[in-house]
Amino acid sequence: MSYLELLKLASPEIVIVITALVILAIGLVTGHAKSSATISTAKPAHALSHTSTATGICSVVAALGLAIAIGAILMLPQSTTLFGGMLVITPLTRLFKIICIALAFFTVLLITSQKPPRHLGEYLALVLFATVGLMLLVGSEELLMIFIGLELLGLSLYVMTAFDKTDARSAEAGLKYLLFGSTSSAFTLFGISLIYGMSGTTGLAAISEKLATASVQPLLAVGIVMTLVGFAFKIAAAPFHLWAPDAYQGAPVPSAAFIASGSKVASFVVLGKIVLVGFAPMHGSADWHAMTAGWSPVLASLAALSILIGNMVALAQSNVRRLLAYSAVAHGGYTLIGLVAGGRDGFAAALFYTTIYAVTLVGAFGVIGLVRRETGGDNFSDFSGLVSRSPVLAGCMAIFMLSLAGIPPLAGFFGKFYLFSAALHASANHGLLWLVALALLGSFISLYYYLLVLKAIFVNEPSLPAAQPFDQLTPDLVQRAAVAVLAAAVLLLGVMPDVLAARILAALP
Amino acid sequence: MIAWTIYITFGGAVLLLLLPRTFARWSALLTTIAGLVLGLIALVRTPIADLAHFTTIVRAPWVPELGMNYHLAIDGVSLTMVLVTGISAVSTVLFSWDVEDRQNEFFFWLLLVVAGCYGVFLSADLFLFFAFYELVIVPKYFLIAVFGSTNKEYGAMKLTLYSFFGGIFVFIGVLIAYVTAGSLDLNQLSQFQFSPQLQSWAFPVLFLGFAVLAGIWPLHTWAPTGHVAAPTAGSMLLAGIVMKLGSYAGLRVAMNLFPQGFQMWSKWVAFLAVVGIVYAAAVALRQRDLKFVIGYSSVSHMGFVLLGLAAATALSVSGAVLQMFSHGVIAALLFAVAGRMIYPRTHTRELDALAGMNLSRALPFAAFTFVIAAAASMGIPGFSGFAAEITILIGAWKTYPLAVWITGAGMVLVAAFTLRALKQSFFGEAKPGVLVQEGRVALDPDWIEQQSITAAEKCGACLLMFATLAVGLYPKLLLDRIMPAVEAMRFLK
């Protein structure tokens, strides 16, 4: 294996890293100019226009880099394995690298919707580094590499969360996220080390072979549970979800969107690979009358708890971002059902669901960012009467919320049907019906709070004087377009789910 | 071609979002008329033999990996339901002619409900069916919460959550049928032999989910509050078609898929139906708000439908389908009079207050319409209500004679509350101090400028009255098409 070939196979990641470095350089140059301009208060208008040009350049470069990376992925060979699974290229990894980059792309589009952060170059570079983390996670079947990906992603996200230095909430969210995140990393690392100790290897396929002959020993069980706990932190499954509400509420909007979308998708892909490939022999069973030890009852109980706690607590929220955080816990629970079901169908359903969920949440955070820009907050009252101020945004938000609630013809409806039917298919004698029924009860509860958001938007009187209708051609046209595209995607994936579902199924062996 | 009812209605809804305000009403009206005309063409053109079984109209692969098809089909039962949807939709738009605020949005939600209903009645694929069924839920929320009156946010939320709660059970039932039989095609599923043990619990789950929407006692309480909170068009749609979704689905899906489960549980369905008929009629007798009276009367009438289904003879089930048609028309008519003709002109729906106005002099056309509607609702021969209810009772006699006796007694109650509402609302003694003259009603002078019944209202009322009379005088028109379709179903005793 020559280095040149390695470079070729890792070209998407390399493109993004180079883009990030270029943006850092641009930020460095323009940042200096900006600080000198802001000191001379005599020319604030000039300073403003200067900043916005720099913002524009940085964003365009970032978007361009991501686009090139997608192109590079398309050029990759169909399937290769390097270094015992450290870098794997399969149809599945190609598909999900593209999805992760697309999510990052939309996050980049959202960034300029707020007042540009003070160090935009650094911020964008962090987003790109986090994206590289996502790609490493998705594109690896080896525990060490997965851990490196997790850390790269995590470290970038901690900083992104705390990026708004002037906001105490952002700092609080960043600190909480850091503390919880590093604890979870410790858990994961501990679990991985135990598994390595038992099996003598870190490649998932090799682990699976070793485990197939081994019996369930206490030490192995501890290793598996520790690893799962680490991932449960990442996907914010109850009872390891406590960081999520603060991170979602306090972080700058694009960071929150990224945590909710890209990070989640990649975590589910990896978690799925670890449990379904690596721990395959330790599946166990979560069927109601026939529970046997293994990872699936663990995930099933995490799912059940997440669905219950997420939905119940979301009922009491009056802040839209906090509400979305708790609902994210619940949706994590639904997605876990797919993994509990296991098999090709279950994994495909989980991947489909988490992808459409990510698309929906990026869009929802886009709307939140735009509303926040206008009203300065994201409580229900800030959304009051949005429909009279901006019918398009209101319509998009309705699409996102109703898709989350699982209303046809939106993507969430098909996603739920697919998940639940996969769960029932997988279990003999409808053994997973209890989990499905619980999830359906959860989605019934969720409709209520999603409708509360829509009630604020469509029914309540506007809280602001409707002085300036803000559907005009404003500078944030790009964000509006991005939100509209995402809403259209959610609708399209609901009407023609085959577009994505067939691809995922084809990518799975 | 009947499939175009769905496309045109969805297209009309989308178009409404793009068109300027001025065209909103007319495009909504044209859309619904197109749907009705398509239904009528299908009624005339389709040979009766083709309506005897669920004949495929369109079939295209949708998600082949999961066995989902875009599959539409029609038989006599579907056709009847499509017709009543068309009639209700046109009259609903006519009775919403006065909506001024956020007109496009109003008609958008309204057309979504109508399109979803067409979709449910024509679907032959279980997933497609379920998607349309759930699609109808949320537009109702917006119709009521944004455009409603009296306690609208509560009524809207209650109704939506009830429907969605029923939807959970439907979801489970649909999943079970899909996973067990491995198919989503309704025609295939209705041939599949589910094990009796499965049917014994899957049937009640599925049927209960549907029955929530049909207003089965004791899960009916969303209906009166929802009807009262809804704008007139909303009540007309809700009572006219949306409640029928539940009973239609119970017949088409629950009973057809799980016939043995149905036989195990049918006497309980009959029991709940009879309790619903009598209970709702008794409650209606005590209501003061005219819309509440009509809301409870809807529950009572839907009880007949459920009784007809539970009795499971060809005659009773056909009667139930006919009753779905008949009640769709009559309920729409009653709500139109109460919500659109009376309320905007008197600003009250309280029967006691209305009694003091002697509205028959002020609004003669409204009085005439209400008399017709009340007669049809009570089951006077010559109207569709009579034809339907007598068919149900004769059909049910073999299976549940006791239920027929009790229901017969219940019909007296129905007549009682209808006559009471009729007398108090239109034929009370005029009190001094109330200004009443042709076309004008007023309790205080500010309201004098109310216009008399508009042309749009007259058209809508005439359409509905014509429908109930036509079917009442010549029920064979529909029964000839319904009966063979029902006889082809496998749950019959």
Image (tube, grey):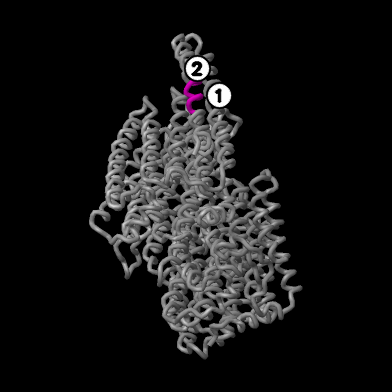
Answer whether residue A465 is visible to the viewer in this image: no
Q: Which disc number belongs to residue B385?
A: none
**Which residue corresponds to mark 1?**
A57
* Up/down of B465 relative to B232, above or below: below
Foreground residue among B338 and A476: A476
Amino acid marked by disc 2? Thr
Tell me where residue A63 appears, x and y as whole percent. 55, 32
Q: Are marks 2 and 1 in contact (CB under 8 Å)?
A: yes
Answer whether residue A24 is magenta in the image. yes
The crowding category of the residue bearing disc 1, from other C-alpha atoms within 10 Å (few below 14, some 14 to 19, many at least 20), is: some
Which residue is denoted by mark 2 in the rendering? A30
Q: In this view, which residue lies farthest toward the bottom?
A: B398
The residue located at (72%, 70%) in the rendering is: B42
Question: A179 or A206: which is nearer to us?
Answer: A206
Which comes sooner in the sequence, label 2 or label 1? Answer: 2
- The residue carrying pointer 2 sits among few (fewer than 14), some (14 to 19) or many (20 or more) residues within 10 Å by Cα, namely many
In percent of width and height, residue B57 lies at 69, 69
Q: Position of residue B249 (x, y in %)?
A: 54, 71
Secondary structure beneath disc 1?
helix
Asked which secondary structure carries label 2, the reply is helix
Magenta region, residue range: A20-26
